[in-house]
Amino acid sequence: SKARIGVTGLAVMGRNLARNLARHGHPVAVHNRTEARTKALVTEFGDEGTFVPAETPEEFVASLERPRRLVIMVKAGAPTDAVIEEFAPLLEPGDMIVDGGNAHFADTRRREAALRERGLHFVGTGISGGEEGALHGPSIMPGGSAESYEALGPLLEDIAAKVDGTPCCVHVGPDGAGHFVKMVHNGIEYADMQLIAESYDLLRHAAGLSPAEIAEVFRTWNTGRLESYLIEITAEVLAHTDAATGRPFVDVVLDQAEQKGTGRWTVQTALDLGVPVSGIAEAVFARSVSGHADLRRAARGLPGPQNDVRYLSGFADDVEQALYASKVVAYAQGFHQIQAGSEEYGWNIDLGQMATIWRGGCIIRARFLDRIRAAYEADPRTPTLLTDDHFAEAVGAAQDAWRRVVTTAAQLGIPAPGFSSALAYYDSLRAERLPAALTQGQRDFFGAHTYRRVDREGSFHTLWGGDRSEVEA
Ligand code: NDP
């Protein structure tokens, strides 16, 4: 009998995805470059469903029903190209190659175009939720043609996480749309994590709470509007004690954050699209700063403020409000980037649906996303989530506390780049006038770059080196 779908690349992600498919009753062909992994999968988990193990690519392809659905779960980058080149010649027109790895969307666009020429569907698919998600239900973001989604969608929706019965999987849009959205999802995750880290740091060093006490604060927050997977695991990590030393776990971990690159891609892409994702950028840079050990060692003696740590009554509540407001900004920026990417590449992405499929399975799953979905349902063309009625009111109500937190951080010398840049973004959007007018004047002065006027159409230049009269450019 033939397999309904096949997975090649059986490291943690591929193995768990294959098991998830098998557990849902889909016969799944399995293949891996190093055969030992294929054998181990069938030996250990063979009783979970129908696995059709294949030793060679030829055998693998032959075991798939047509049109073939072939999922690649290998290391992103050159290995993905190598595997595509290995399998594509064995496929026939109408067959589908799904890349579930963390590919850059530009690579996905390139691969999709090349395979389309050969009559094959290439479906770049963002899969979020790590190995647990892959096994128990990830959030799935497939790109590629609408036609390929007809054949793949039901299978993917079947194995995706479900929230209120709705699968966390939807056709995002053509070619690289799925990987683009997955990339921005990861960028938002960076921002969310940075804001939580700053909240912890402030509660610790401004309010003087212990990690165990802060864990309790996060547990309380997790019963309210901040309820989310990240807040939940933050409490777990903070409550954990290091067995070897008896100290709080968070105190024995080296404070240098690492990154795999999707946050950086998000910011690089945002710069190209001209979208201000300052919250995501600050998060990427904060990890970068933390890793510069030499720089930090050299600067450690620089003077800071002479304030003592002291308990500020109501401070934890202020931090909750700052976190909430900053989080709204981070998501507003991320959704702006998706909107800009969608326009640039003609993807026609439904923003509300992106919030819907992130409610389960993925790292940023949260109650909050229901609100974002509602905002886009109320107005699919809303220019920013910040002006949605619900968010405008909530952030407006939080802003005094948010400002106190940023002020406190600055006064005590506690870095809070996420909170303060989010506030600056909020105030920039709100401002009647921005000093960009002065910037334009400077640019015109030194480079004759011209400027536009508030009262007349056209471009103008002032003769700065002459009589300072104005000419139309
Ligand atoms: P890895 O990224 O560690 O990749 C290992 C797999 O790739 C193995 O099956 C390996 O085969 C195969 N491989 C590597 N090079 C080649 C090659 N040249 N030809 C054929 N096969 C090759 O595995 P993961 O399971 O961690 O991740 C798979 C993909 O999913 C990656 O793109 C990753 O970015 C993405 N992803 C991972 C998440 C995670 O939490 N780990 C979350 C979401 C996405 P062999 O056994 O023969 O070495």
Image (tube, rainbow, N blue to C red):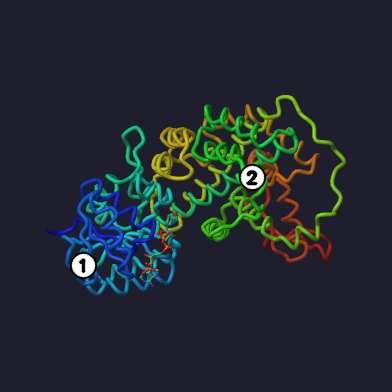
Q: Say which element carries label 1.
A: helix
Q: Amino acid at mark 2?
A: Val
Q: For the C terminus, give its image quadrant.
A: bottom right
Q: Of the residues under marks 2 and 1, which one precedes in the sequence? A: 1
Badge 2, how many Cα within 10 Å: few under 14, some, many 20+?
some
Q: Amino acid at mark 1?
A: Val
Residue 267 vs residue 39: left or right?
A: right
Q: Which residue, given by chain and number where applicable, does mark 1 sit on?
A: 61
Q: Are marks 2 and 1 in contact (CB under 8 Å)?
A: no
Q: Nearer the viewer, residue 375 or 323?
A: 323
Q: Which mark is residue 446?
A: none
Q: Residue furthest left?
A: 1
Q: Residue furthest top?
A: 313
Q: Tell me which image quadrant ligand 1 sits in.
A: bottom left
Q: Residue furthest front?
A: 244
Residue 471 vs residue 359: left or right?
A: right
The spot of residue 273 in percent (x, y) is 53, 58
Badge 1, how many Cα within 10 Å: few under 14, some, many 20+?
many
Residue 373 vs residue 248: left or right?
A: left
Query: Is label 2 or label 1 in front?
Result: 2
Q: For the N terminus, give its image quadrant.
A: bottom left
Q: Nearer the viewer, residue 469 or 395?
A: 395
Q: Which residue, given by chain and number where applicable, does mark 2 sit on?
A: 250
| The quadrant where residue 63 appears | bottom left
The spot of residue 267 in percent (x, y) is 57, 57
| The quadrant where residue 311 appears | top right
Against 308, residue 333 (above or below) is below
Residue at 38% x, 56% y is 13
Q: Say which element carries label 2.
A: helix
